[in-house]
Amino acid sequence: MPVVGERQGIERFPKVVHGLVNQIENACEMNNIAFLKKPQSVTIRATKKTNEFFMVLGLMLTKIANLSGLKGDISEVNKTDIEDLIISFYSFLSLDEIFYAFKLERYNQYQEKSKHYEMFGAEYVSEVLKKYTNWKSNAKKQYNIPLPKHEPEEKELTKEEKEVIVAKGVERMYQEFKNGKEIPTSCVYIYNYLRKKGVIKPHSPSYKEEKRKKAVKNIKVQNSIINDVMSLRKQPTKEKIEDECKRLALIDHFQKRLESESSKKT
């Protein structure tokens, strides 16, 4: 299955793709009642999964992330997880509904705002789409808007399905590591998952201190590269240090796994 985007830059997409995404944005420029009453666009389930479809999805997700105020790139592993999530569990929605779902999130139209922790990943996307499907159902009842006769029942992700999505993310990230790609800080959820599952064991105090010192150094180097003067003047936050420590520990875990696999082959 193609990855929704090979890199974050919006300008790399063909004009026809920009045109299709602009149509989706225009379809969302209306109030809630008008949006609910308009004829439903073709669902993702009924859309052919062509190269053009994946490019449109990729550009749309990039724009959504930018509008959500998220900085930096969406990592390849996160893009693929989001793609799998949407096609596997939210294909009853249309692309304009996905765009509108995040518009409602930005405008605080749901009861609670989801925390993205500066990471546009499958878990965050799943939370927003789940809220949208609940909002859509309740709003149609409130405004007496009939549901289409053929509208499929909205499916909520089970604990097991969420587990499968994260497990796939772990394997994709490991394969990228094997191919020499950098592990982004946004993938600390993989560390959390492996730690919770007991795959990564508790660390010794000396190991933690070693990673903490390296994390602080890395963050300062990163800030100097992007010429973030304000960040250079301040000490890295506890959250940033913790995320970088997890990233470094995840690299160590993958390195040990790679060495173990190599030793078994010899």
Image (spheres, rainbow, N blue to C red):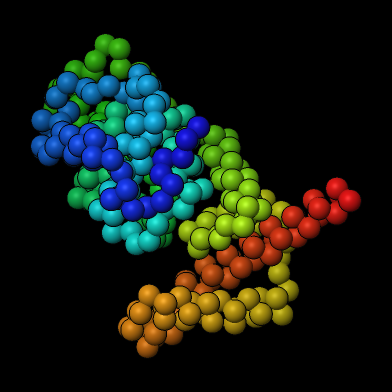
Residue 187 appears in view: yes
Going by the picture, which residue comes out furthest to the top? 149
> Exactly how many numbered labels are in the figure?
0
Going by the picture, which residue comes out furthest to the right? 266
* Residue 227 versus residue 162 in the image, above or below: below
Q: Quadrant of residue 160?
A: top right
Q: Residue 206: x and y, percent?
A: 72, 80
* Residue 126 versus residue 115 in the image, above or below: above
Q: In which quarter of the image is residue 205?
A: bottom right
- Residue in the picture at 43% in, 30% down: 87
- Horizontal side, residue 56 vs residue 254: left or right: left
* Residue 112 versus residue 26 in the image, above or below: below
- Tell which of 47 and 91 is nearer to you: 47
- Residue in the picture at 37% in, 88% down: 233
- Residue in the picture at 35% in, 26% down: 44
- Tell which of 223 and 40 is nearer to you: 223
- Tell which of 51 and 113 is nearer to you: 51
Residue 159 appears in view: no
- Horizontal side, residue 255 vs residue 188: left or right: right
Q: Residue 250: x and y, percent?
A: 63, 61
- Residue in the picture at 17% in, 28% down: 36
Q: In which quarter of the image is residue 41?
A: top left
Q: Residue 38: x and y, percent?
A: 14, 24
- Horizontal side, residue 181 vs residue 18: left or right: right
Going by the picture, which residue comes out furthest to the bottom? 233
